[in-house]
Amino acid sequence: MRYSLEDYDQHGFLKTPIWLWLTWFWLSKAWLVFVMAGATRHNGVDILAFCYPQRSHFYAELALGLPAVIMMWCLHLRHPERVIMTQWIHRLTRKVTLLSLIAQASLGVYYVILQHGKFEWFNGISLLFLLWMVLYVCNSRRLSVCFQMNNNHQVISPSGDTLIDSKD
């Protein structure tokens, strides 16, 4: 057995790696700013204007962060009794996360083009983080084991036990 018992949740699924959670939080940073702005009430408009001077950028990042927010919410719906939901989560999580990362990186490149190549630290750091996250999602062995399914559409554990069989 590759992972210890603490690495599994109460339903027998391998817990989601912390790096995937950080990736999802980075993708949903516009949602975090939106919640912070809403929580402060009086200074909310100032916070939004400081973080996103152009409203169109804010709305674009809200739209691109929505899949990450949905993935964070759906991950808690994994349960052996919810066969279809669990299979959907296991099948799409990596793909949706990777597409969101690529879309967010494309938006970052678009921001650089809008500024005529003028360097800004936030854009540079953001693009670097997005590149690291793409490499992580593509190459992480733990992430692939966390959302592994076999050819019969069965959710399997790293020890090889069948957790969910779609034929039941």
Image: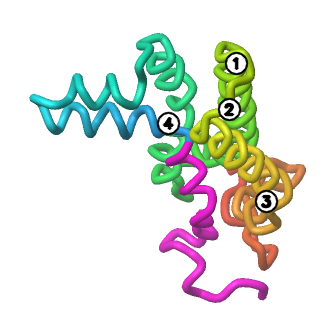
Which residue carries the number 4 mark?
Answer: 70
Could you tell me the amino acid type at mark 2? Phe
**Alpha carbon distance from label 1 to label 4:** 25 Å
Which residue carries the number 1 mark?
Answer: 110
**Alpha carbon distance from label 2 to label 4:** 32 Å
**Alpha carbon distance from label 1 to label 2:** 13 Å
Dot 2: what SS? loop
Q: Give the mark nearest the N terminus, 2 or 3.
A: 2
| Quadrant in which residue 157 is drawn | bottom right
Q: Give the mark nearest the N terminus, 1 or 2.
A: 1
Q: How many marks?
A: 4
Could you tell me the amino acid type at mark 4? Ile
Which residue carries the number 3 mark?
Answer: 144
1 vs 4, front mark: 1
Dot 3: what SS? helix
User: In the rendered structure, are the residues bearing label 1 and label 4 in contact, judged by CB atoms less than 8 Å apart?
Assistant: no
Could you tell me the amino acid type at mark 1? Tyr
Could you tell me which residue is drawn at 59 percent across and 87 percent down? 5
The magenta-colored residue range is 1-26
Q: Give the mark nearest the N terminus, 1 or 4.
A: 4
1 vs 2, front mark: 2
Query: Closer to the camera, 160 or 96?
Result: 96
Could you tell me which residue is drawn at 72 percent across and 56 percent down? 147
**x, y percent for residue 7:** 59, 79
Left or right of 144, for residue 84? left
Could you tell me the amino acid type at mark 3? Ser
Q: Is residue 100 above or below residue 117?
A: below
| Residue 140 on the magenta span | no
**Alpha carbon distance from label 3 to label 4:** 19 Å
